[in-house]
């Protein structure tokens, strides 16, 4: 077993950074996320920092702000990560792909292809989509109900797993003399008849060095947690307070008791963490002020309001967020319950709306500080045992990621929290996950 420290770090890159006007900064290529160099740069820096993975959130729809800012999700994440795979050797590459639109065969093949090309570093983050615009772009109508989306997700993921498991890791014998490519029983076809899919056949891509791609899941409703318990190795979590993280862990453990295969490792939980970094706390505050123009704050507030189901004008910046139980019940089928729960826990902790906006908070934890303060927060949270690491977000990735690797990672290493080198070459190895048996 690996003796590596257990803290896991990913970088999430939806767009150029969390700051809405990142593209307008000096030295930033406004077309960055539409160019392969951006993904290569991020992956190389992640690898230099010994990160577990580069992670691409994805909301594939033309967003109506095209006149004011670049689209956050431009390139197909799988293709962009494939380019990054060819320019790196160790770092994991996790693509978010919704289960609501594709056929399982297409998804299983694409992720398995990335897994082969990267030599065992691919991951798939399961989502069911939450933005109605995505429904309009893919199905032509509004999003299906969340319950239906999760029923499809469950069946979809089960089929994907069967497709991936078609080839046993030792299936290929390639006996040129005897003319046998696979050993008897090494390739197992299957037949599936379900509510959404009917499939006869098997996967075409043989297993990679990590046998099966790593499965992430994002979505904090009961159905989301049940899906994670059944299939996921790790989850991307929205938890802006320790209470929210505790509540999430309790619910995930309960779902795992009911739905996880006996003996399988517990699901790892990685909350999002938005970092505003300076060389000192004061410099970080100055940077934060510089990036907190009223326009950006209004956008963050509008997103919070939308998730809570209230009018932005009803939010008093100097009071806690307006939440009540009835509205929570109403909203949870409309929006991502994972984000909603986190926002509610922030409101209940008494923090003002202004303070939430200040922390970048659309539901994720945020920190503004110098290297030590950022490392302290990571350590403090990690030592609760409620989380296994973080999926980091930066205000402007091209300005802040290198300094994080240079200044925060060494502190985490000195404290014995984070690896000093990669022990393995696969994403599964970085996450300390066993190679699954057949
Ligand atoms: C932390 C987190 C990240 C998410 N990232 C994405 C994403 O990148 N793309 C997407 O379509 N949905 C994303 N989702 C939401 C999923 O689509 C989810 O399946 C659906 O909205 C239902 O969410 P719920 O289970 O939290 O209610 C995310 C949800 C959470 C909590």
Image (spheres, grey):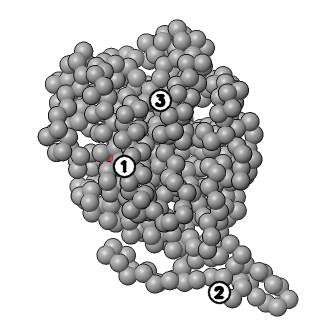
Q: Residue 39's spot in the image, x, y percent?
A: 60, 41
Instruction: Compare residues 408 and 54 and report the one nearer the observer.
Output: 408
Cα separation between marks 3 and 2: 48 Å
Using a 10 Å C-alpha cutoff, classify the residue at mark 1 as few (fewer than 14 neighbours), some (14 to 19) or many (20 or more): some
Which is more foreground, mark 3 or mark 1? 1
Q: Residue at the location (69% across, 32% down)?
A: 416
Q: Which residue is mark 3?
A: 274
| Vertical arrangement, residue 281 with respect to residue 141, above or below | above
Query: Where residue 178 sits in the image (x, y, percent)?
Result: 82, 91
Q: Residue at x 46, y 72 (%)?
A: 159
Q: Specify the farthest residue to the left.
A: 326
According to the image, label 2 marks what residue?
185
Disc 2 residue crowd, few under 14, some 14–19, many 20+, Cα 10 Å? few
Q: Secondary structure at mark 2?
A: loop
Question: Are dots 1 and 2 in contact, CB under 8 Å?
Answer: no
What is the CA distance from the residue labelled 3 to the residue labelled 1? 24 Å
Above or below: residue 254 compared with residue 46: below
| Cα distance in 3D space between marks 1 and 2 | 40 Å
Q: Nearer the viewer, mark 1 or mark 2?
A: 1
Is residue 123 visible in the rendered structure shown here?
yes
Q: Residues within 10 Å of mark 3 (few under 14, many from 20)?
A: many
Quadrant of the rendering where the C terminus is positioned:
bottom right
Q: Residue 140: where, in percent of width, then height? A: 27, 59
Where does label 1 land, which residue?
251
Asked whether 130 or 348 is in front, the reply is 348
């Amino acid at each position: 077993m690996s003796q590596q420290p257990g803290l896991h770090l990913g970088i999430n890159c939806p767009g150029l950074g969390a700051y809405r006007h990142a593209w307008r900064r000096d030295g930033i290529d406004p077309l960055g996320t539409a160019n392969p160099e951006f993904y290569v740069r991020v992956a190389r820096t992640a690898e230099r920092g010994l990160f577990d993975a580069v992670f691409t959130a994805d909301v594939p729809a033309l967003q109506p702000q095209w006149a004011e800012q670049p689209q956050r999700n431009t390139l197909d994440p799988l293709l962009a990560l494939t380019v990054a795979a060819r320019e790196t050797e160790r770092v994991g590459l996790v693509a978010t792909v919704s289960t609501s639109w594709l056929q399982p065969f297409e998804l299983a093949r694409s992720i398995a292809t990335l897994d082969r090309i990267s030599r065992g570093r691919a991951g798939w983050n399961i989502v069911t989509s939450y933005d109605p615009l995505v429904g309009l772009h893919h199905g032509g109508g509004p999003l299906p109900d969340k319950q239906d989306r999760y029923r499809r997700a469950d069946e979809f993921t089960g089929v994907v797993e069967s497709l991936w498991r078609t080839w046993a890791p030792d299936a290929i014998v390639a006996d040129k003399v005897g003319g046998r490519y696979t050993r008897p029983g090494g390739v197992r076809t299957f037949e599936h008849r379900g509510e959404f899919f009917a499939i006869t056949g098997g996967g075409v891509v043989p297993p990679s060095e990590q046998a099966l791609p790593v499965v992430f899941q994002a979505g904090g409703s009961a159905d989301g947690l049940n899906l994670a318990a059944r299939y996921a190795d790790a989850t991307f979590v929205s938890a802006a307070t320790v209470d929210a993280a505790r509540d999430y862990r309790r619910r995930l453990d309960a779902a795992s008791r009911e739905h996880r295969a006996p003996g399988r490792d517990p699901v790892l939980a990685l909350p999002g963490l938005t970092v505003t970094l300076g060389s000192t706390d004061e410099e970080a505050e100055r940077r934060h002020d510089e990036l907190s123009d009223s326009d950006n704050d209004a956008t963050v507030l509008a997103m919070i309001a939308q998730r809570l189901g209230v009018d932005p004008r009803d939010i008093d910046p100097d009071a806690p967020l307006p939440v009540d139980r009835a509205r929570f019940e109403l909203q949870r089928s409309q929006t991502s319950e994972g984000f909603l729960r986190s926002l509610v826990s922030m409101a209940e902790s008494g923090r003002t709306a202004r303070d939430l906006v200040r922390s970048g908070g659309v539901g994720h934890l945020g920190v503004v500080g110098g290297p030590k303060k950022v490392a302290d927060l990571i350590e403090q949270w990690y030592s609760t045992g409620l989380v296994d690491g973080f999926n980091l977000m930066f205000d402007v990735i091209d300005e802040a990621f290198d300094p994080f690797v240079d200044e925060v990672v060494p502190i985490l290493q000195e404290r014995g929290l984070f690896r000093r080198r990669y022990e393995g070459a696969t994403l599964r190895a970085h996450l300390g996950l066993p190679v699954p048996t057949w």
